[in-house]
Image (tube, helix red, strand yellow):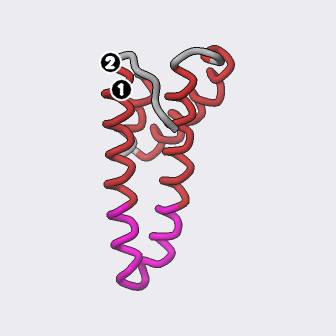
Amino acid sequence: MVVYILQAVGFLLGLTFIAAVVVNYIKMGDVKGTWLESHFRWQIRTFWFSLMWMVIGSILSLFVIGWFIVIAAAIWTLYRVIKGFLRFNDKREMYT
């Protein structure tokens, strides 16, 4: 749950999004083989794909299309954080 909270706060303070993925990688061994493993994969993928699209959008922000990419990436990231949190709260695995 801490990672989802860090990811959510990452919308205000970007460094917490990085802290969240660091926690994921450090604790991955502890959740291996449990229902939480799917959440860790979900969170790690959320981080890397969000980072990729934000970088692409930022580079292209010199053009109008970049702003649309940044906005779409932010909405997609928010969706994944909320969806993951809700499934975690229900103690359900994430599908990947």
Amino acid type, mark 2: Asp
Reading the image, the residue beneath label 2 is 90
- Residue 49: where, in percent of width, then height? 53, 53
Q: Quadrant of the N terminus?
A: top left
x, y (%) of residue 19? Answer: 53, 34
In the structure shown, which secondary structural element does the residue marked by tag 1 occupy? helix
Q: Main secondary structure of the magenta part?
A: helix
User: Residue extending furthest right?
Assistant: 29
> In which quadrant of the rendered view does residue 67 lie?
bottom left
The residue type indicated by label 1 comes to Arg
Q: Look at 40% across and 30% down and name the residue there.
A: 4
> Which span of residues is magenta-colored?
53-72
Secondary structure beneath dot 2 equals: loop
Q: Is residue 19 magenta?
A: no
Does residue 60 show up magenta in the picture? Answer: yes
Count of numbered circles in the view: 2
Cα–Cα span, label 2 and label 1: 5 Å
Q: Check contact, mark 2 vs mark 1: CB within 8 A.
A: yes
**Residue 52: quarter of image:** bottom right
Residue ID at (41%, 76%): 66
| Quarter of the image where one finds residue 6 | top left
Q: Position of residue 94 (x, y in %)?
A: 46, 30
Which residue in the structure is indicated by mark 1?
87
Q: Residues within 10 Å of mark 2 (few under 14, many from 20)?
A: few
* Residue at 46% from the left image edge and 24% from the top image edge: 93
